[in-house]
C-alpha cells in the first residue's frame, strides 16, 4: 500500500510538471514560464551591471594590481 501511494505521488508530480510545460505552448503571450525566464534574464543583467560597477572601484583595481605583483 505504501509503494502504491509513493507511485501515485510520483505520477501526480509528473503530470503537474507536464501541465506546467504545456502551459507555455497553449498561451505563449501569457505564460508563467515566460515571465519566470524574463525575470531570470533581468536578474542576470542586473548582476552583470553590478559587477561592471564593482570593477570601476579604485580599491578593487589597486588590490588587483597588488596581487599581480
Image (spheres, rainbow, N blue to C red):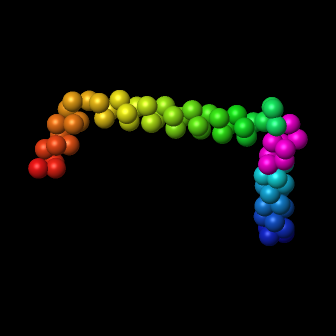
> Is residue 31 shown in magenta?
no
Q: Is residue 35 left or right of residue 30?
A: left
Q: Is residue 30 left or right of residue 42?
A: right
The N terminus lies in which quarter of the figure?
bottom right
Q: Nearer the viewer, residue 67 or 36?
A: 67
Magenta residues (range): 20-27
Q: Nearer the viewer, residue 54 or 4?
A: 54
Quadrant in the rendering for residue 51 = top left
Q: How many marks?
A: 0
Q: Residue 60 location, x and y as percent?
A: 23, 36
Residue at position x 11%, y 50% from top? 69
Q: Residue 44 location, x and y as percent?
A: 52, 38
Q: Nearer the viewer, residue 8 or 1?
A: 8
Residue at position x 13%, y 44% from top? 66
Q: Is residue 63 visible?
A: yes
Residue at position x 16%, y 43% from top? 65
* In this view, 2 is above or below 23: below
Residue at position x 81%, y 42% from top? 24
Q: Is residue 40 left or right of residue 60?
A: right
Q: Residue 19 location, x and y as percent?
A: 84, 48
* In this view, 57 is above or below 14: above
> Is residue 21 shown in magenta?
yes
Q: Is residue 5 visible?
A: no
* In this view, 6 is above or below 50: below
Which SS type dominates the magenta stretch? Answer: helix
Amino acid at each position: 500500500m505504501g509503494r502504491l501511494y509513493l507511485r501515485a505521488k510520483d505520477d501526480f508530480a509528473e503530470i503537474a510538471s507536464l501541465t506546467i510545460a504545456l502551459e507555455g505552448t497553449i498561451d505563449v503571450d501569457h505564460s508563467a514560464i515566460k515571465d519566470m525566464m524574463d525575470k531570470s534574464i533581468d536578474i542576470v543583467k542586473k548582476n552583470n551591471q553590478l559587477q561592471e560597477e564593482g570593477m570601476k572601484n579604485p580599491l578593487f583595481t589597486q588590490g588587483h594590481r597588488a596581487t599581480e605583483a
